[in-house]
Image (spheres, rainbow, N blue to C red):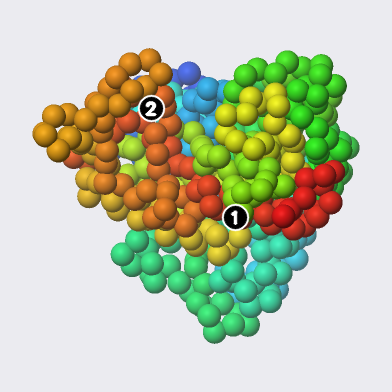
Amino acid sequence: MFTCPRNELPYNPDDPVSIEAHGRRLEGRTVIDIARELDYRQILESQDGGKGKVGNLVEAWFRLAPNSRPESDFPCGVEIKVAPLKPHKTSTYTSKERMVVGVIPFNDIVREEWETAHARQKLERILVVTYKHDFTNAGQAGFLISFLWSPPAIDTPQLRTDWTRTRDTVRMGHAHLLSESIGRYLGPSTKGTGTRNNPAADLVQQPFSPILAKRRAFALKARYIVVQVRKRLAPEQFVRLADPRTRIETIESSILSKLHSYTGMSVQALCDQLEIPVLGTDKSLAARLLNAALGIEEGKSIEELETAGVQVKTVHARKPDSKSRGKYLQPFEAMSFPAIEFEDLLDEEWGPNVGILDELQRLLVIPTFSDNRKTPQADRILGPAFFWSPTANQEHIIEEDWTELIDQVQNGAAAEFQVYNPDRTPRMRKTSKRIIPWVENHLPGERDGRILHLRPHTGDADDKVPVPGGQITRQSFWLNRSFVRELLVASFSDQPDQSGLTLQ
């Protein structure tokens, strides 16, 4: 188990507190710094601090022999998990990936109960070692905080619910229908070695059905991990809405009930009532309205929603009583997500750590309606808010759209090129500030994908990033307008009477 005699270890492997203290000695130091101290050639010779190598380095720090151990890393039951984090402009850090707990053995889980489940045992005592991922110089990645973690009592009921939903789905012979969205904190993430060219490599048999299912592992959601870190770095940022024993479904229902009471009001009228300003085309309107409606100070995070990975979004659409046939509830624009890093994107294989899956984990959508896209935000009418997570079928479509986009980027389709007029003079276009060259690329457009597409995320035409074959204006993933409309239509179908907002 160890690379040196136990009496030479710089900590007591039988004492969780001693193990945590040794982990905390990493804090504030870089990957290369630790590699030099340990003379760790795997990193020193490549200057590479990829997650796998950092994980091996942390094991070396604890003098653990390299080995894929099914049991815990230490005799006292503690297991090490390394968590790479990325800086985030609004929430300190965001997790680069989920935290895998263990493979889901379909034939075994159907006979388990939560109290004695293998997954629960794996969750009981984890040493979380976090480090700041450095995009430009992996070796300079800095270790952040290390801490012992066990499921908080307030989270255990939801973890149990998440686990039970997965087990019951397998019991029904539906392991092939499992999806990340089945769990709020703990999800059945895909797990395997297959590639886009050989997805069948990750298909396994399941009990109670002849249909092959994707190999899966239980994993703590990325946003859940981030909240555990943020609560230790800045606990004052969080506010709870309800008693810790309250289920997240109950909390979501209460939030919708509150927001639905404002349906049919103008944004200006609601802001006046809540005593908050209307800030033009404020992109944070939905989050500001939510906090104000729930009586929470602006800038504070709602712990239950953050822990469950809920993102608050708004969408501006044509009002449902519009006289324009076929255009009711049509969004005026697609729904955007944060700008992407192409370097990271091209390193990804489809799986649970794909960034867009994390972004789409759970959305709270607060729609506003008007007759045209130029209606000032203050004059738009609030529609019925709703929660959404992708179904298994939607996840499959997202995978297809994502895979096509990644293949096209790798083949050079993202590289921009100058567009010319028939007389061979450069075509130009006018922005709000200046006249700039008209450039295009060969990426699939919004009409080519069923749910997702890539498009610019910036109004600065000079904000370019490198891609295979050239460069492109900074991009992000967007949900297609047609798909967002489907979500709006489904929401209205569930709630036909919306204070005068009726479907024609």
Pointer 2 local density, CA inside 10 Å: few below 14, some 14–19, many at least 20: some
**Amino acid at the residue labelled 1:** Gly
Locate residue 397 relative to residue 188 in the image: left or right. Answer: left
- Residue underneath mark 2: 134
Does 164 sit left or right of 476 as displayed?
right
> Alpha-carbon distance for marks 1 and 2?
48 Å
Query: In which quadrant of the rendered image does the C terminus lie?
Result: bottom right
Name the residue located 25 percent from the left edge and 26 percent from the top edge: 428
Q: Which residue is mark 1?
A: 326
Decide: few, some or many residues near mark 1? Use Cα within 10 Å; few <14, some 14-19, many ≥20. Answer: few
- Residue 149 x, y percent position in the rendering: 66, 37
Where does residue 203 sit, x and y in percent of width and height?
45, 72
Q: Is residue 120 left or right of residue 342?
A: right
Q: Residue at x 38, y 67 (%)?
A: 199
Relative depth, front residue between 348 and 374: 374
Nearer the N terminus, badge 1 or badge 2? 2
Q: Is residue 163 above or below residue 488?
A: below
Between disc 1 and disc 2, the foreground one is 1
> Mark number for residue 399?
none
| Side (left or right) of 36 relative to 111 | left
Q: Amino acid at mark 2?
A: Asp
Q: Residue 399 occupies which quadrant of the picture? A: bottom left
Name the residue rendered at 53%, 80% in the picture.
Answer: 211
Q: Residue pushed farthest front?
A: 323
Q: Nearer the viewer, residue 473 or 170?
A: 473
Question: Between 172 and 132, which is closer to the camera in this rendering?
Answer: 172
